[in-house]
Image (tube, rainbow, N blue to C red):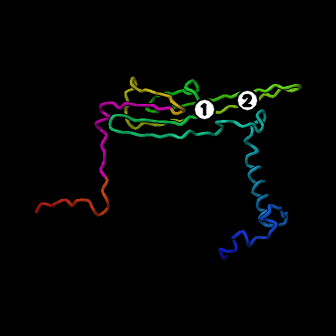
Amino acid sequence: MLKTSLAPWRRPLGLLRGERHEDHPMETFHREVDRLFEDFWRGFELPMLGRLERPMAGMTPRMDLTEDEERIQVSLELPGMDEKDVEVVLGDNVLTIKGEKKAEKEEAEKGYAYKERSFGSFRRSIPLHAEVVTDKVEATFEKGVLTVMLPKTPEAKKAYKKIPVHVSGKAKKLKTAA
């Protein structure tokens, strides 16, 4: 196929203006893809909520996990949430962070009332490979970002070793005893 056949000026003029040609192969393909996705997602809707937007449904917050010799730090982006919506639990060397957000919108006008509710939740469990001082774990929430600081035990600090990375071919050769 020549690349010029993909150029828009080679297509029939009706397709450029947004007109639909029911028998056009791309139009048929588009309808079939739409039908496929509608059939797939149909089983996941909750009947009582219908098609209302659910702000956190299926959401997995973005997470950054960093570690140095002294501590492990976990940060989660939780826009639109407050600290009261979040629970942080540490047990059996697993850090679990849960959140739940409920929203309600109500409008009342002459002759009608409109009420909409939405709900969403998430749960992240992070296994920790190093022992931490549980009494000194701190969690802060600022501007939609939850940060959990987990200080390591003295034993875990000793086990931490940073490995230098060398550019290929530039590593020094060891001298052998002759």
- The amino acid marked with disc number 2 is Arg
How would you rate the neighbour count of disc 1 (Cα within 10 Å): few for under 14, some for 14-19, many for 20 or more?
Answer: few
- Residue 99: % across, % down: 58, 30
> Which image quadrant: the N terminus?
bottom right
Q: Verify whether residue 155 appears in magenta.
A: yes
- Residues shaded magenta: 146-164
The first of marks 2 and 1 along the sequence is 1
Q: CA distance from mark 2 to mark 1?
A: 16 Å
Q: Would residue 74 be found to the left or right of residue 56 on screen?
A: left
- Kindly indicate the quadrant of the structure image that contains residue 115: top right
Q: Verify whether residue 26 appears in magenta.
A: no
Q: Would residue 100 be found to the left or right of residue 24 on screen?
A: left
- Residue 158: % across, % down: 28, 36
Q: Which mark is residue 23?
A: none
For disc 2, the marked residue is 117
Task: Give the answer, above or below, for where 172 lies relative to 85.
Answer: below
Q: Would residue 147 be found to the left or right of residue 136 on screen?
A: right
